Amino acid sequence: MPPAPVNGLSVDVEDWFQVGAFEHVIDRADWDRLDLRVERNCDVILRMFADAGVKGTFFTLGWVAQRCPSMMRRIAGEGHEIASHGWDHARVFTFDRDGFAHDLIRARDVLQDITGCAVIGYRAPSFSIDARTPWAHEVLAEQGYRYSSSVAPIHHDHYGWREAPRFAFRPVAGADLVEIPVTTAELAGRRMAAGGGGFFRLLPYAVSRWAIGQVNRAGHPALTYFHPWEIDPGQPRVADAPLRSRLRHYTRLDAMAGKLKRLLSDFPWGRMDRLAAIEAERLA
Ligand SMILES: [Zn+2]
């Protein structure tokens, strides 16, 4: 049997008050007055990764990096990749081309200045590169990004680009940029995003293990992503958010750490830039 593919391990570094589900009940202007918990949660994640002996990629908001520079240096210092998640979680389809280019530059400048590491990877907030943003990958290629992990090839109520390829592809003709879509699984003719988020946290761990196994058995690497707030049962509760959002956000936070430990030991994991380099070679 060929060796199992190395899968991409990623953390989307944002805090509990920055998630899309709460954007209508938490005022952007209040962010600096809210309890910033991302740093202690990232320290828990760093310990977990160190215990498992794995390296991963931290797609970080420029807004967070600016407020937590020592955390950023700890992440980079432990051998993890620093990549961009944009400035303040504005989704790509809310920008025009120039606005997106500006958001990318602002976030990358801060990430690189703080860590001294070159940023070559990008993940759009809420996987928001889709059919509405045909210029987005071109802008990433113009700015020299090597990879993006910003597309969800599914239908979902908040996001999705069903027509996009399921596995790594070159989105801009003549450019080296590789897009690595979020991992999807297929069951009874239905396709679902199986890379992380609610799928991983809300469903039994065995479902994620099955989905990643399905992708690996087909010869493809999978990726997983989660957020620092997902391992933090003590975070403040946003009472006036819609019930559906609250159910999605707060359910099974206490089970996450245990599930993540199993995930890290059941499959081989690596940084997304490493995965992107392997995929670029395969696509060449
Ligand atoms: Zn995010």
Image (tube, rainbow, N blue to C red):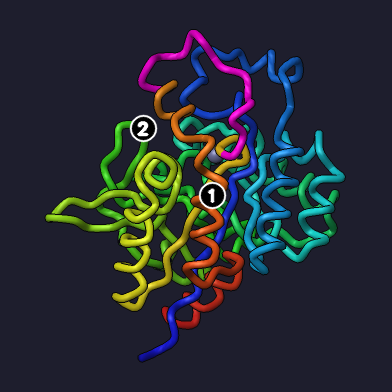
Q: Secondary structure at mark 1?
A: helix
Amino acid residing under circle 2 = His
Give the residue at mark 2.
Answer: 158
Among the 4 quarters of the image, the one containing residue 3? bottom left
Mark earlier in primary sequence (2, 1): 2
In depth, the one of 248 and 256 nearer the eye is 256
Give the residue at mark 1.
Answer: 258
Give me the residue at 39% from left, 89% from top. Answer: 2
Residue density around tag 1, few if under 14, some if 14–19, many if 20 or more, within 10 Å: few
Distance between the Cα atoms at labels 2 and 1? Answer: 28 Å
In depth, the one of 97 and 119 nearer the eye is 119
Amino acid residing under circle 1 = Gly
Q: Quadrant of the C terminus?
A: bottom left
Q: Which residues are magenta?
A: 231-245
Residue density around tag 2, few if under 14, some if 14–19, many if 20 or more, within 10 Å: few
Please provide percent x and percent y for residue 211.
32, 60
Among the 4 quarters of the image, the one containing residue 106? top right
Vertical placement of residue 269 versus 219, above or below: above
Decide whether residue 82 is among the magenta residues: no
Please provide percent x and percent y for residue 199.
37, 44
Q: Quadrant of the N terminus?
A: bottom left
Q: Secondary structure at mark 2?
A: loop
